[in-house]
Amino acid sequence: MVVIFGPQNDPCVHHTSRYLRQQGEEVLLVEDASRLASGGLCWALDRPHNESYFLVDSQPIPFASLSGILLRTLPENQSQPEMSLPDQQYIASELQATLVGVFHALPCPVINRPLPWRFHRSLMAGWEQVNLITGCGLQLPPTLITSRYEEAACFYAHHGQAIVNTPAKPDHRQSIRGKEGTEELKRLFAQQSLALQAVPSGQWLQVFVVGQQVFGATPQSALLEEGIGEPLLQPVELSPTLQQRCCRLVQGLQIDFAQLCLLQAEREVYCFDIHLLPQYEQCDSRLQERIAAALATLLSPGEKELRDDSPPGQAGRSDDRLCLHLPAG
């Protein structure tokens, strides 16, 4: 049995479950993953896997019966108004730790396993991730994090185009360019410190990596030249060298299903973002079908288990991404 945690209106959930059923695989969809937080889990550490189970709609699902799991959402602790905030935070931390442990202990492929270090979001990638990205032949864009407008204005004037976000909201990114960008920079700086990533001239690419398979995509139009937002993505061929680099990066991060936001300049390929939960809904129908088929292959019985003995580090949570700013200091 394959268990998919995610809403039924998620195209990735719908297409992947359809492919699996076409292969004769039994599929269980769990739309409300928060059920696991309220007594839906029995994990016996000192006994065989067939004595541990998930409980879904009063039906026990033994770990030993699972052939694969796809996590498009993660269970979250439900608010308990009668409890103090410190008690709620303690319970939430315990739940997160338990889920990290159980999804890494399962004897089957688990796609989008929670990363322990992603429960505590950070604006910047660590040096280990930076070295991995550059070691794979990709580059990070020139970046400035500052609380001084003069420094930001000088950086922006030199590069002419930038992507801006804030330490308080690292997922909210905005592209600025030209004279209008200068005015917007002033407006944003009146509120808080900023992080700026320079945008070289080149072609934006979105690369989806599923196991050993790599799928390139590009916006259907110039609606969002900045490479951020929600354009419709259509397939594009990638060079074998770039495919290998993307595969090495994703495998090095211990991820099975990821989306890379790249910019292919004249001489370099820059990595701007890594989505630990890919934005599948942005893809056109052809690309969605290919990605879903690849996911179904990873989850099918008989496939090689995905790094069960590796250190923690499978892919992440809804809307999670690895922010690729160079660490300070």
Image (cartoon, grey):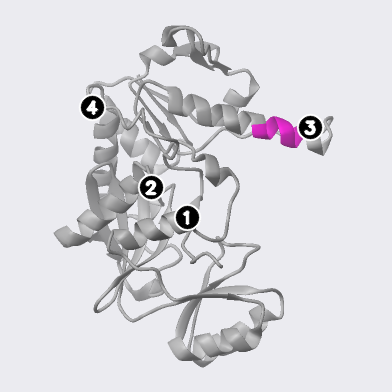
Instruction: Give percent across and percent down for residue 199.
Output: 41, 78
**Residue 92 magenta:** yes
Q: Viewer-nearest of labels 1 and 2?
A: 2
Q: Position of residue 288 (x, y in %)?
A: 29, 48
Q: Front-most of 287 and 226?
A: 226
The amino acid pointed to by label 1 is: Leu
Left or right: 52 in relation to 137 = right
Q: Under tag 1, what secondary structure? A: strand
Q: CA distance from mark 3 to mark 2?
A: 33 Å
Kindly tell me whether residue 281 is visible in this rendering: yes
Q: Which label's residue is closer to the chain start, 3 or 2?
A: 3
- For disc 1, the marked residue is 322
Of labels 1 and 3, earlier in sequence is 3
- Type of the residue with mark 3: Asp
Mark 4 = which residue? 303
Residue under label 2, please give it: 253
Residue 286 lies in the magenta-colored region: no
Q: Which tag, 1 or 4, sits closer to the chain's start?
A: 4
Q: Are marks 1 and 2 in contact (CB under 8 Å)?
A: yes
Residue 87 image label: 3
